[in-house]
Amino acid sequence: MSKYPVKTQSTGFTVAIAFVLLIVLYVVLTTNVAKDLSYGAGMDEYDAGHYSKAVTDFRADVKDHPLHSLGHYYLACSLVKVKQCPAAQKEFEKAYQVELRASNPDLSFAAKCLSRSKE
């Protein structure tokens, strides 16, 4: 063991790494929070029977998160409720396609989306 402490200049490097990690954490959290906010707001509006408002919220969700199959699905369900069936059919198809491309697809959900797209 050395009698003298080893002096390093890693303090600046450590601060820089911590700063980068904080930025990454902020981006991840805000992205997930935004996803949860628009999707959650859409679900609240859908459950309350405010389908036009739900359409707006779910459109925001799928715009920001095009690979969110549930967002597409509930956008489609909301569009059905406001009598926009051709648009709903397209969203059911998108939900189906997105779900099939997922890393661990729920095949029963995908089949439900496909079935609804053909109604």
Image (cartoon, grey):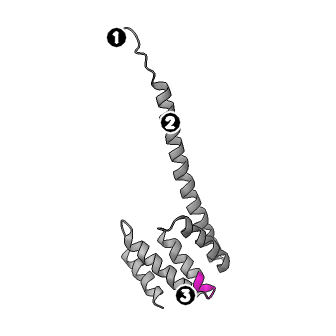
The spot of residue 23 in percent (x, y) is 54, 44
The spot of residue 82 in percent (x, y) is 63, 85
What kind of residue is marked 3? Pro
Read off the magenta span.
Answer: 79-83
Is residue 27 something one can see in this rendering?
yes
- Judging depth in this view, the residue of 50 and 30 nearest the camera is 30
Is 6 displayed left or right of 36 in the figure?
Answer: left
Numbered circle sitting on residue 86: 3
- How many numbered marks are there? 3
Vertical comparison of 27 with 83: above or below: above
Q: Is residue 80 magenta?
A: yes
| Residue at image mark 1 | 2
Q: Is mark 3 on a helix, strand or loop?
A: helix
Instruction: Identify the residue at horizontal 61%, vertical 62% (top origin).
Output: 37
Q: Is residue 106 magenta?
A: no
| Residue at image mark 2 | 18
What kind of residue is marked 2? Ala
Is 1 displayed left or right of 53 in the figure?
Answer: left
